Image (tube, coloured by chain):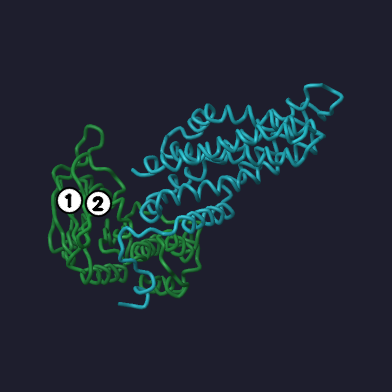
Chain colours: A green, B cyan
């Protein structure tokens, strides 16, 4: 199963008005592979990741997720994608558990309170599931983003600035998540921190 | 593989949640958020109450002895109060998702039809609360006599369904615009004008105490209007919601 997952980008371009920030991005990733997209601010890293997730339309080109013999566009394969990014905001007026329970239901996942608590434990938020997200620090909110992204165990994990706002233990969490994802899926990471290039099998430099 | 994996994971990339369960989850999430933040509720209640109080202070009791055309005036005033209070609150369901930047998380997790139906239900609950409050205040403070209360309730319910059906899709359209409030009113009014005419005429008949034979026509029009707009919205919502 694991080696049948592929993420293919073909000639993807992103434009904002007359300004082209990406042109002709093409790559093909298989299960177990990690790609690091590196570049300075404004080079189009986050835009590329949003295109992969179907959150932004490319000006040109295609994104295809292949699982077995079936092919999907990003917006057709919501269960295949997990996304962590500074742009990702969960509901501040809900608790962490309420956030996860809501997203589990809308994703059609069977879930029990213990499962969600176990997930929170995994991302270092054990015992804090009943707190409103509004009371979380930025590092805790980032941990909850990981719980949101991992909730459905997606075959394609997309991480934008994965260690931003994290302390050392948070960085260790990111390392664990990426190592685990290698066992069954694909990871795409965008970063402008050269130290994070060590996560990748390949590095795509933009800008 | 952990116990969590077996319970929570989904290996089917296009498997979708049951539509009604997901829509109900969106509705419950919006109700819970609203009860904690009161973004829409406070605005709607304040607007409804202040409108009726202003009418009451300015016009005094609208008793039957004052004017033979009174029921149509009363019905018009009631629906205007409902409409303007609704304008202040019904756009919030989508605007809040965009302003708080929660929309991306929702887009990645939920199918568009579930989002639309959940928001529709939330707007309906909010509007029914508003209509109940406005009508009770209106009847008490302006001393309005209601000849056929059941028919008035039916017209108000059918009109509310139509109003919500028309405005929920427009709320999604304007959520990413920069001049949300003005755009919401401008886009909604042409759609709502026929609904208002029928709802006002039906409400006037109910206030006059006419029989159900005068209410069936408006109720049929309002029901047809609602069904047409909900079906059209379900078809159009994908292109509005997706980037």
Horizontally, is B40 left or right of A158 in the view? Answer: right
Residue at 36% across / 78% down in the picture? B3
Q: Is residue B7 above or below residue A140?
A: below
Q: Is residue A99 above or below residue A60?
A: below
What is the number of the mark on residue A52? 2
Tags 1 and 2 touching, CB below 8 Å: yes
State the image coordinates of residue A140 (x, y, percent, origin top left): 40, 64
State the image coordinates of residue B28 (x, y, percent, origin top left): 54, 56
Q: Quadrant where the C terminus of chain B lies?
A: top left
Q: Closer to the N terminus: mark 1 or mark 2? A: 1
Q: Quadrant where the N terminus of chain B lies?
A: bottom left
State the image coordinates of residue B17 (x, y, percent, origin top left): 41, 59
- Dot 2 alpha-carbon crowd within 10 angstroms: few under 14, some 14 to 19, many 20 or more: many
Disc 1 element: strand
Between B43 and B238, which is closer to the camera in this rendering? B238
Looking at this rendering, what residue extends furthest in the right direction? B65
Residue at 78% across / 22% down in the picture? B69
Image quadrant assignment for residue A66: bottom left
What is the number of the mark on residue A83? none
What is the number of the mark on residue A9? 1
Spatial CA span between label 1 and label 2: 8 Å
Between A171 and A92, which is closer to the camera in this rendering? A92
Disc 2 element: helix
Q: Name the chain letter of the residue that bears numbered label 1.
A: A
Q: Is residue B29 above or below residue B46?
A: below
Q: Is residue B204 above or below residue B227?
A: above
Residue at 26% across / 64% down in the picture? A155
């Amino acid at each position: 199963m694991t080696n049948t997952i592929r993420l293919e980008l073909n000639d993807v371009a992103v434009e904002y008005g007359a300004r082209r920030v990406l042109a002709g991005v093409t790559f093909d990733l298989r299960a177990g592979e990690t790609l690091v997209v590196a570049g300075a601010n404004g080079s189009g890293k986050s835009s590329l990741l949003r295109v992969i997730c179907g959150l932004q339309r490319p000006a040109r080109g295609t994104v295809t997720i292949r699982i077995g013999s079936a092919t999907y566009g990003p917006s057709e394969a919501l269960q295949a994608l997990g996304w962590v990014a500074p742009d990702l905001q969960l509901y501040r007026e809900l608790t962490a558990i309420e956030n996860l329970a809501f997203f589990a239901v809308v994703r059609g996942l069977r879930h029990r309170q213990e499962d969600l608590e176990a997930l929170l434990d995994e991302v270092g938020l054990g015992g804090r599931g009943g707190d409103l997200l509004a009371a979380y620090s930025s590092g805790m909110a980032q941990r909850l983003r990981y719980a949101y992204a991992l909730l459905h165990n997606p075959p394609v994990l997309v991480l934008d600035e994965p260690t931003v706002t994290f302390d050392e233990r948070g960085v260790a969490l990111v390392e664990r998540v990426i190592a685990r994802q290698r066992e069954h899926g694909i990871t795409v990471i965008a970063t402008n921190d050269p130290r994070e290039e060590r996560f990748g099998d390949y590095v795509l430099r933009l800008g | 593989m952990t116990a969590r994996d077996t319970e929570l994971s989904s290996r089917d990339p296009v498997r979708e949640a049951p539509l009604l369960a997901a829509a109900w989850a969106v509705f419950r999430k919006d109700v819970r958020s609203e009860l904690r933040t009161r973004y829409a509720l406070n605005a709607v209640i304040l607007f409804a109450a202040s409108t009726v109080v202003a009418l009451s202070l300015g016009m005094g009791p609208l008793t039957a002895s004052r004017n033979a055309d009174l029921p149509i005036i009363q019905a018009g005033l009631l629906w205007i109060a409902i409409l303007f209070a609704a304008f202040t609150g019904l756009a919030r369901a989508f605007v809040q998702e965009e302003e708080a930047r929660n929309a991306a998380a929702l887009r990645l997790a939920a199918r568009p039809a579930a989002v639309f139906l959940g928001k529709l239900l939330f707007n309906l609950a909010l509007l029914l609360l508003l209509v109940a409050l406005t009508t009770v205040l209106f009847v008490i403070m302006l001393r309005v006599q209601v000849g056929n209360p059941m028919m008035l309730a039916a017209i108000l319910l059918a009109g509310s369904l139509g109003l919500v059906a028309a405005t929920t899709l427009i709320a999604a359209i304007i959520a990413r615009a920069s001049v949300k409030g003005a755009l919401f009113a401008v886009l909604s009014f042409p759609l709502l004008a026929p609904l208002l005419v029928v709802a006002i005429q039906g409400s006037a008949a109910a206030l006059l105490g006419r029989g159900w034979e005068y209410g069936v026509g408006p109720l049929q029009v309002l029901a047809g209007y609602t069904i047409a707009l909900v079906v059209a919205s379900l078809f159009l919502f994908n292109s509005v919601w997706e980037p």
